[in-house]
Image (cartoon, helix red, strand yellow):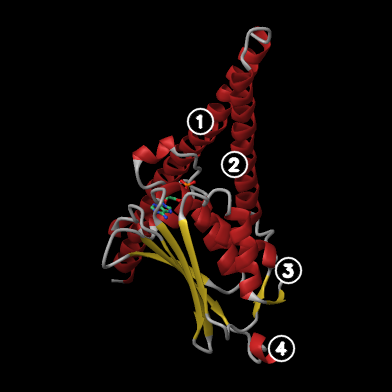
Amino acid sequence: LLDALADQAALAVERVNLVADVEKARLDAETDRLRSALLTSISHDLKTPLASIMGAAGTLRDFSASIAPEARADLLSTIEEEGERLNRFIANLLDMTRLESGAVAPNAALYDVGEIVGSAMRRAQAILRHHKVEIELAADLPMLLVDPVLFEQALFNLLDNAAKYAPEGSRVRLEGWSDGDQVTLRLLDEGPGIPEGDVERVFDKFYRVRKGDQVRAGTGLGLAIARGFLEAMGGTITVSRRPERSGAVFTIRMPVPVGAPQLEALS
Ligand code: ADP
C-alpha cells in the first residue's frame, strides 16, 4: 500500500512539474510578446514627432530663400511643438523607469493641497485654454503628507488627459473636500469617458482605450505614472463614468496624517 501511495505521489509531483513547465513557457512567450509590442509602441511614439521635425527642418533648409515669413514661423512652431512632445514622452519614460526600479522614494512633508493644485493648474493653463476650468476646494482642507513634485505630476497627467480627450469648450471641474480621515480630489470632464470594462486597465502602462486615440499625442503611460506616484504616497486613484452624462470622473483619495493642522487654524 505504501509503495502504491509513493508511486501516486511521484506521479502527482511529475504532473505538477509538467504544468509548471508549460505555464513558464507560456509566460515567457507572453513576456516576449509584450516586450516587442512595447518596443514597437515606443519606436512609433518617437518616430512620428521626429519625422515632423526632420520634415520641417528640411523644408526650411531647402527653401530658405523663398519661404514667406508666416510659413517659416509655422515650420518653426512645428519643430518646437514636436520637440516638446518628444520631451514629454521621454520624461514619461523616465518617470516610469523610476517607478519600476522602486526608485520613487517620496520626499514627503506637510503641504497645502490647494497650493499644489494651483501649481498644477498653472502648468496646465496653456493646454486647457480652450476649456472652461472650474475649481472648487473646501476651505478647511487639512495639510497632506506628500511629495509636491510627485503629487503635482499626478494631477498634471489627469489635467493633460482632460485637455486631450474632452472637447474644446467643455467644462473641466476639480473638486476637493475632506471628511476628516481623508482628502478627496475629484476631476470631472465632459469627454467620451472610460468604458466600464476599461476602468482598471487604463491604469496599466501602455494601455490606450480607443484605437483612434493614436491620433492624439499619448503614450499610455500618464495614468500608470499617476497611480504609481499616488500609491507611493499612501493614496489611491480610481476612475468611473459620470452617471448623468458622458465624461470621466477621476477620484484621488489621500490619507490625512494624524494631527495634521488645518489651514484655517494656521492662518
Ligand atoms: P495616454 O493619454 O498617453 O494615452 P494615459 O495613461 O494617460 O495615456 O491614458 C490611458 C488611456 O485612457 C488613454 O489612451 C485614453 O484612451 C484613456 N483616457 C485617459 N483619460 C481620459 C479621459 N479624461 N477621457 C477619456 N479617456 C481617457
Q: Residue at x 55, y 27 (%)?
A: 47
- Residue that mark 3 sits on: 107
- Residue that mark 2 sits on: 89
Dividing the image into 4 quarters, which one contains the N terminus? bottom left
How far is the residue under mark 3 from the one under mark 4?
Answer: 23 Å
Q: Which comes sooner in the sequence, label 2 or label 3?
A: 2
Q: Position of residue 185 (x, y in %)?
A: 50, 72
Q: Residue at x 61, y 61 (%)?
A: 120
Q: Nearer the viewer, residue 69 or 108?
A: 69
Q: Which comes sooner in the sequence, label 3 or label 4?
A: 3
Q: Are marks 4 and 2 in contact (CB under 8 Å)?
A: no
How far is the residue under mark 4 from the one under mark 2?
Answer: 40 Å
Q: Nearer the viewer, mark 3 or mark 4?
A: 4
Amino acid type, callout 3 = Asn
Amino acid type, callout 1 = His
Element class at badge 3: loop
How far is the residue under mark 3 from the one under mark 1?
Answer: 34 Å
How many residues crowd around disc 4 within 10 Å: few (fewer than 14), some, or many (20 or more)? few
Dividing the image into 4 quarters, which one contains the C terminus? bottom right
How far is the residue under mark 4 from the one under mark 1?
Answer: 50 Å
How many residues crowd around disc 2 within 10 Å: few (fewer than 14), some, or many (20 or more)? many
The residue at the far front in this view is 69
Q: Residue at x 31, y 65 (%)?
A: 242
Element class at badge 1: helix
Q: Which comes sooner in the sequence, label 4 or label 2?
A: 2
Q: Can the viewer see residue 207 in this picture?
A: no
Q: Which comes sooner in the sequence, label 3 or label 1?
A: 1
Label drawn at residue 266: 4
Q: Is residue 231 above or below residue 65?
A: below
